[in-house]
Image (spheres, rainbow, N blue to C red):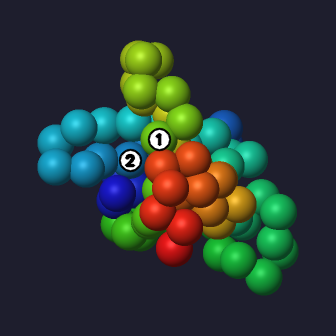
Amino acid sequence: MTVIAVAPVGSEVDANGETGFIDQVKHPSWWDEDTAPPQVGDRLHVVVLDASREEPRFSALQSDIDIARRLRGTGA
């Protein structure tokens, strides 16, 4: 995903023409002061939290990515 807009509540992201949203608490910078806040143009590895919402919701937190991998059975 590529960040295409940033607001105080989160970031709008794009993947191949499909847009979605990452809430501020689902970006690592919310939890780690050494991590830079999102900026337009940043590329992120994300996981889908809710594809049914308008705009779909994503998370860039490693813990959420790890949970998704375990649920899918890929482990790594």
Secondary structure of the residue carrying numbered label 1: strand
Mark 2 surroundings within 10 Å by alpha-carbon count, few (fewer than 14), some (14 through 19), many (20 or more): many
Name the residue that disc number 1 marks. Answer: 48
Identify which amino acid the numbered label 2 is placed on. Answer: Val
- Please state which of the two labelled residues, at mark 1 or mark 2, is closer to the viewer: 1
Residue at left offset 31%, top offset 37%: 19
Residue placed at 38% from the left, 47% from the top?
A: 13
Left or right: where does residue 74 sit relative to residue 38? Answer: left
Compare residues 68 and 16 and report the one nearer the observer.
Answer: 68
Residue bearing the label numbered 2? 13
Q: Looking at the image, which residue sits at the far front?
A: 73
Nearer-N-terminus badge (1/2): 2
Where is residue 33? Give x, y as percent.
Answer: 83, 74
Residue 76, image x, y percentages: 51, 73
Cα separation between marks 1 and 2: 12 Å
Query: Could you tell me the amino acid type at mark 1?
Result: Val
Residue 6 at least partly seen: no
Against 18, residue 60 (above or below) is below
Residue 3's spot in the image, x, y percent?
Answer: 40, 56
Q: Quadrant of residue 60?
A: bottom right
Image mark for residue 62 = none
Looking at the image, residue 20 sits to the left or right of residue 19; the answer is right
